[in-house]
Amino acid sequence: MLHRFSDDISSVEIPGRFNNPFHYRPHPLCVAAVEEVRRSLNADDTLRTEVAKGKMFGVLVVRDKKGEIGYLAAFSGLLAGRNEHPFFVPAVYDMLSPDGYFKREELEISNINEEIRALLASDGYIAAKAAYDESVERCAGEIEAMRKSMHDCKLLRDAKRCAGQLSPEESAALIAESQYQKAELKRLQKGCKEKIAECAAALNIFTEKLNAFKEERRRRSAALQEWLFKEFAVLNANGERRNLFDIFLEYRGIIPPAGAGECAAPKLLQYAYLYNLRPLAMAEFWLGESPVGEVRRDGCYYGSCKGKCEPILDFMLRGLNVENALSDITAADDTKLDILFEDDRYIVVNKPFGMLSVPGKVGGLSLQELLCRRYNNENIKVAHRLDMATSGLLVAAKDGDGYKRIQALFAERKVNKIYYALLDGVPSVADGEISLPLSADYMNRPRQMVDFESGSSAVTQYRILSTRPYKGRECALAELQPHTGRTHQLRVHCSHRLGLDTPIVGDELYGKADERLFLHASHLSFVHPYTGENLSFDSPAEFL
């Protein structure tokens, strides 16, 4: 499983610290290893076809006991229906062993699923369900028809009362008619209730069996998952061993999610520790077609998934000298803030890339904190946000009422914003509108994904202004105008295959890392909420 580099790596500097797996730039040795993995996959016809559908892989550069450098390779989940292939490290725990407890219990759960499917397809269930549904529909129709008839009769009675003087006998007849109809409705409702209850009782014979099967399936599935995660033990660099159940319980207080421990990173580290190989650098990368929802591009590097891997890697990396998460640029000097406008209510400022808009867990002082410090005013709040990696115009309010009013303008889409981006390639269509709903990728925060079922509407107008060479490739300068303000909206709309299919240069989340993210909020205009003045601001991008 330990591979030696085919090319000469003697001139490549060996990393002094292990890279942070969630935020890193791939080391040259990792890049070289990735190319060798590509060559190996392309040499296998079956795997080449399978990989073309899309798969996440990983490499781990290691030093063996003799001090020699090599690398390990792994894939996430299964590859061509198997969890073991000769070129790649094995799974941490082989739950696919045909004679193992997991497969035996999985077979029992599959048998329960077959029982459920057979019951749902049985003539008795189908007939009982149809009779119940027909009874409910027929009774609802009869009751609705009677209510309509009663309503029409009431209108006629009201008309007779309004038409003139009624005799006592005529008034009594109208009252009697009303009372009779109400009694008839009650009799009909009672009869319908009895009919429905009779059909429901016949159907319940089947639904009780179904519920019993489903409860047994739920119980056995939960027990199997717990058993699996207690058997699924991983090592760290200190030689300690813990199972996934205990790791997640300690780290997050939850049961591990399905698929935990099956990503490339835990597989690589586990194999290294088992065979006394010292981890030096790691990288995970995508090969093949992107999924419909997530943005994954062939040959791009990605951080480990936080939902499944963060607790595991927190344990497995103990004993290694690991780099902190990257935060290349943080501005702590408020005198460097580029203020374009200010009055008693608002501040318009040009945020540099690499600075947080509002306080966060990492990244140093945020723009909001620096404004509060500069103006000695803790009430200052940024009215909208730019990603840490994005530069450009932001508006902040000096007090709560000003914040509410400017927020209302954003909510009503009365603030005009224009961004400029350098795209890593040239889109096939020069202008148009992108409408792709977005939602959070909870397993890979802060990434967003296209979600047609439950995502929030996101619309971007775009225009390709020109093309220009950048680092040996032809790139496009794009004008982007968001009509909604979703997290990472422009970045996903540019990179997703149903959008421009061309990521922004320097987008390490949805494309490839560079010296910076080439995205700049260049124009901002709105009507001043207090004075009614039309305010318009422009800030040219450094990369134009």
Image: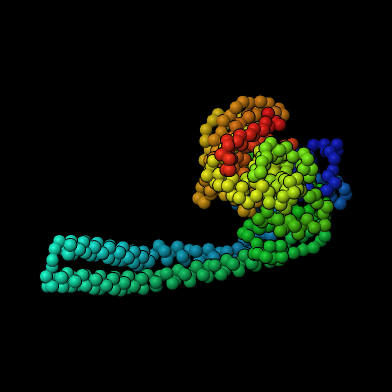
Q: Is residue 442 above or below residue 437?
A: below
Q: Is residue 212 above or below residue 502?
A: below
What is the total number of numbered labels drawn onto the structure image? 0
Q: Is residue 503 above or below residue 92?
A: above
Which residue: 70% across, 47% down? 368
Which residue: 63% across, 46% down? 383
Whether residue 287 can be seen here: no
Tell me if 537 is positioned left or right of 483 in this view: right
Which residue: 57% across, 66% down? 221
- Residue 314 location, x and y as percent? 75, 57
Q: How is the image coloured?
A: rainbow
Tell me if 10 is positioned left or right of 416 in this view: right
Residue 312 falls in image quadrant: bottom right
Residue 516 falls in image quadrant: top right
Q: Residue furthest right?
A: 66
Quadrant including the C terminus: top right
- Residue 289 location, x and y as percent? 59, 41
Whether residue 338 can be seen here: yes
Report the front residue among 139 and 386: 386
Which residue: 52% across, 70% down? 216
- Residue 185 location, x and y as percent? 25, 70
Report the front residue among 119 and 242: 242
Q: Is residue 521 above or below residue 149?
A: above
- Residue 26 location, x and y as percent? 75, 42
Report the front residue among 304 and 179: 179
Report the front residue among 412 and 373: 373
